[in-house]
Image: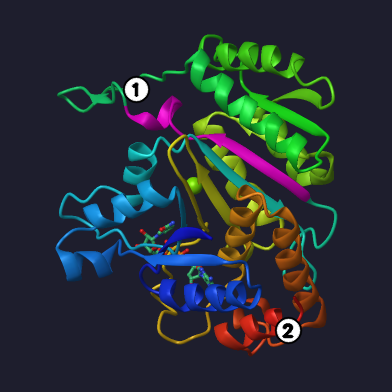
Amino acid sequence: MTTITVIRGDGIGPEIMDATLHVLDAMQLGLQYEFADAGMVALEKHGELLPAATMDSIRRNRIALKSPLTTPVGGGFSSINVELRKRFDLYANVRPAKSFPNTKSRFPSGVDLVTVRENTEGAYIGEGQALSEDGEVATLTQKITRRGSERIVRYAFDLARKTGRRKVTVVHKANILKSTSGLFLKTAREVAQQYPDIECNEMIVDNTCMQLVMRPEQFDVIVTTNLFGDIISDLCAGLVGGLGLAPGANIGTEAAIFEAVHGSAPDIAGQGIANPCALLLGAGQMLDHLGMADQGNRLRGAIIATLEARDTLTPDLGGSGTTLTFAKAITSRL
Ligand code: NAI
Ligand code: MG
């Protein structure tokens, strides 16, 4: 019996989580859920956005399925997602982008790639961020380490091997950012030599953006540093139908957290019309991570079959179904 921490979240969070658990329950996976609060709901109930009990639960179970959280604006609250990333050293942000049928997408077929983004270094860590007193000059220090580069590239190659993918593209800007991107690229080349069974190629980040838009089918696994990975993974989500279908995982040495990429969607919360697919696909990534890739494929297969049949899709996909009828349609195709 595997116990996972389940965070129902804010806004549409509880609705898409209920739908997701409905489907997971029907799969009879032997998963046990430990519910924990985070976000606005936790702030109201316990006076904290990220209560200690929630952290303990994730630390104990090492696996969490998480709905979107609302970070209050103002009041000095830092992002909960950033906090989780720091506390559990969630160094790999893994974002699959796959074409799905009957979605309003530029590439309804042909795209099946995964972006692996380094999550703990580089431009986003905020070291040495400064603005001169007169407000005229801003500076930022970017730190890239061999250790950080090595573990993310290794993660990407291991993922390729484990999931039957054949190629890893190392995305960089070492021609200009000679020290930081240079170290990342050099380390990546060394790691790649240890995976002779996986093809490795290198691509400069700006060219990568153009190639992704023109010929995304050439990509399989992309591995890159924090800032480039942030931008590229959203670009990839946009290629294949946007937020409602984009899952993500944050994988670390101490825990792994699976989620939808989108936020708590306050504009449609409480209406029961949110698309549960992104969180369901996040649950699929969780099953893969737990060594249940067959079940992950079963779940993805049922989602694809439901999209193909256009069965009670939610309004964002052009249907008139609800979160729950959509989930039930998926369940019936497991
Ligand atoms: P959002 O992703 O919540 O919403 C953007 C647009 O996409 C909205 O029109 C929304 O209705 C739609 N949308 C999003 N998910 C959908 C779904 N599953 N089905 C149908 N439509 C969907 O982004 P926004 O509005 O910028 O952020 C809202 C709140 O979410 C903020 O408090 C933000 O901090 C938080 N947020 C949390 C994240 C997380 O916990 N991982 C990630 C991004 C934002
Ligand atoms: Mg982003």
User: Is 123 in the magenta?
Assistant: yes
Residue 332's image quarter? bottom right
Residue 139's image quarter? top left
- The crowd level at tag 2 (other Cα within 10 Å; few <14, some 14-19, many 20+) is few
Badges 1 and 2: C-beta atoms under 8 Å apart? no
Q: Is residue 191 above or below residue 250?
A: above
| Three-letter code for the amino acid on which mark 1 is drawn | Leu
Q: Which mark is residue 99?
A: none
| Three-letter code for the amino acid on which mark 2 is drawn | Ser
Q: In the rendering, at what x and y percent does residue 55 appear?
A: 30, 50
**Which secondary structure lies at badge 1?**
loop
Q: Residue at x 24, y 65 (%)?
A: 42
Q: Residue at x 71, y 67 (%)?
A: 299
Of the pair 2 and 128, the residue shown nearer to us: 2
Q: In the rendering, at what x and y percent does residue 277 appear?
A: 62, 69
Of the pair 254 and 316, the residue shown nearer to us: 254
Q: Nearer the viewer, mark 1 or mark 2?
A: 2
Q: Residue at x 81, y 82 (%)?
A: 309
Residue 234 lies left or right of residue 309; in this view the side is left
**Which secondary structure lies at badge 2?**
loop
Q: Is residue 327 above or below residue 222?
A: below
User: Is label 2 within 8 A of ligand 1 (CB to nearest ligand atom)?
Assistant: no
**Is residue 177 visible to us here?**
yes
- The crowd level at tag 1 (other Cα within 10 Å; few <14, some 14-19, many 20+) is some
Q: Which mark is residue 332?
A: 2
Who comes first in sequence, dot 1 or dot 2? Answer: 1
Q: Which residue is mark 1?
A: 140
Q: How many marks?
A: 2
- Quadrant including the C terminus: bottom right
Numbered range of the magenta stretch? 112-126
